[in-house]
Amino acid sequence: MTQVLKPYLPQERDETVLSWVARLAAFHTGDIVARFLNDFSIPSQRLLAGDNEVLRNLAEITGADFGGLRALQPEQTDQRRYRFRGNDFSSEFMPQKELAYCPRCLREDDERGHSTRVGRWMWLFEPVRVCEHHNVPLIVHQKTKWNDMIRGFNEIAPEKTAIARQADNMPEWSVSPLQGYVVDRMRGETGPAWLDSQSIEQASRATTMIGVLEGWGASANLHTLVDDDWDKAGQLGFEVTSGGVSTIRQFFERIQRNHPSPNANVGPQAVFGPLYKWLQFSRGGKDYGPIKDVLREHILDTMAVKAGSNLLGEIVHETRRHTVKSLAKKSGLDVRTLRRALVSNGLLNGGDKSSLNNSVDAVAGEQLAGALSRAITFREIPEYLNATRGQVETLLQEGFLQPIINPSGGNRRFSSWVDTREIDDLIARVSDRAKSVDKPTSGMLRIPDAAQASKRPTKDIVGLLLKGRLSTVEKISTERGYLSLRVSPVEVEEALPLPQADKRPGRYQAAKLLGLSSRTMKRLLETPGQDFFHPEVRKEGACAKECFSFEEMERFKRKYVTLGELKKRSGWHHADVQKELRMHGIHPVCDPKWVCAYLFEREQVDPVIL
């Protein structure tokens, strides 16, 4: 077929094929579009669908370039699916029952003397609500007749005088960054990476729904939003989505932190409102793109969702977070006890009441709950471990045993609780190389006895056992726990050689090792009739200097305890410790003002302060 219509009527810039056909009809025949198409046997529905064969026939009839026509008319690829300039989308993205136009553009067409007004391809798409040339909102004409979609704007829009009046009365709007992104992408330009990684419709919908959540909150009613609202939503949402996944996750955290009525049972729908409902309750199996995975992962990472739940179309296979209530139910612990422990251990922020802080990491929470279920108090440890109270205290002070809650956590109740699993692990480690015997070999002693015989600290002997540096270790088969172990004091001495006499600690070093101030050490030595220390005096030239044996310091630690040590051990405030001791008639062994410290007899204190 050769060119039939002459002279050639070129398309205007950005003009749709349907608009051009309307102008062709008016220019060549002065008739309406429907009759013009019938004259050339062009099915209107196939033209609306952007059928390639129809566009080729139209190109031959008019002498136009097929590629140019193809670039200006969306192509239907499937039922309710279209493609335009390499972008695929649904019919919802290009409304079929409405036509949008800019009255100022149409007025300019009238003023230029065009026989027919020009329809621009940008106006076809739902996110485009503002004319990019005049910054006024587009007017939407709802389809009322079956052939509205192929009628020109001369028929659909008001006549010249009315369109001029309409153009004068339009309010000023700015083009939203989302609209700019959509149009630029249609023109082949690149944009933010996360948005470009998905379809243009997915990017637009996700941006808009995030904007609705930002601007109208979790209780937003989508049915009450008007064009101005949707345009604002696009502006708000683009500020978030243009930054990619990290910015989106930060936005979700802010929404959670600012949720108006947080409580332990608040769910994702209450927090994320329209965005969550849009993704969770969708019909027809629509693919909403990566926003679904981003929100799903964020919910699983920050909120308690039960395994087996359907979250945004997928079954949750593993719980990542627990509420205090769900963790208490699973572990069998009291809710209040568990909450205090979680706060003390730093897994919950006691002062943060936002929905971002109403759950805990499932692994860490279950580990703590398990430890609490197995825990015993300081008073119970000696019997469980089969060790003296002093030995238990040494193991705790030196870090061989750790309380389930760090004393610095502020909750004194848990500061002396120890997981029995940790105690069992310690016994297993120190007994790792022990030989089981019915009776100890001659010269083999219990750890505290070996410490006295070898004049070496208990902590160092335990350290040797843990490092496997003692070759001869025995475990009495009829005994259990810590005191069932036997070591050789001779081997301990060889493994831990004492420093030379002139290397033994002086007063300052000894005070530091004992946790005392140098002034307190001096005052204790000056106390009349004191039995605290019996230092040896060594000559250094013309001077005499006191030196303290490790045995002497171990004896002091076994007999006395400071207020600071009691405070650290119990997790109490020092005033509470003193009050408790006074209630039991326990007083410092010497005047605190004189020695600059509160010193008590351990034998009196141990039954009172755990």
Image (cartoon, rainbow, N blue to C red):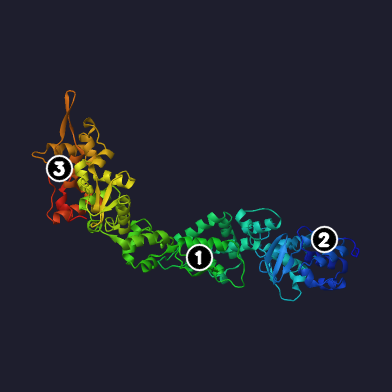
> Mark 1 or mark 2, which has the lower sequence index?
2
How far is the residue under mark 3 from the one under mark 1?
A: 62 Å
Taking the image as shown, residue 293 lies to the left or right of residue 24, namely left
Whether residue 82 can be seen here: yes
In front: 605, or 71?
A: 605
Query: Helix, strand, or loop for circle 2?
Result: helix
| Three-letter amino acid code of the residue under disc 2 | Phe
At a point 37% along the width and 69% down the height, the residue shown is 329
Q: Nearer the viewer, residue 72 or 438?
A: 438
Q: Nearer the viewer, residue 220 or 303?
A: 303
The location of residue 27, given as percent across then percent down, is 85, 65
Residue at the disc numbered 2:
66
Q: Which mark is residue 272?
A: 1
Report helix, strand or loop for mark 1.
Answer: helix
Which quarter of the figure is the C terminus placed in?
A: bottom left
Circle 3: residue type = Lys
> Dot 3, crowdedness within 10 Å: few (<14), some or many (≥20)?
few
In the rendered structure, which disc, 3 or 1, sits on the residue that comes first in sequence? 1
Query: How many numbered callouts?
Result: 3
Looking at the picture, which amino acid does disc 1 mark? Phe
Residue 216: % across, % down? 52, 65
Q: Is residue 468 left or right of residue 241?
A: left
Residue 593 badge: 3
Spot the residue most to the left.
529
Q: CA distance from mark 2 to mark 3?
A: 102 Å
Q: Position of residue 456 (x, y in %)?
A: 23, 41
Mark toward the start of the polypeptide (2 vs 3):
2
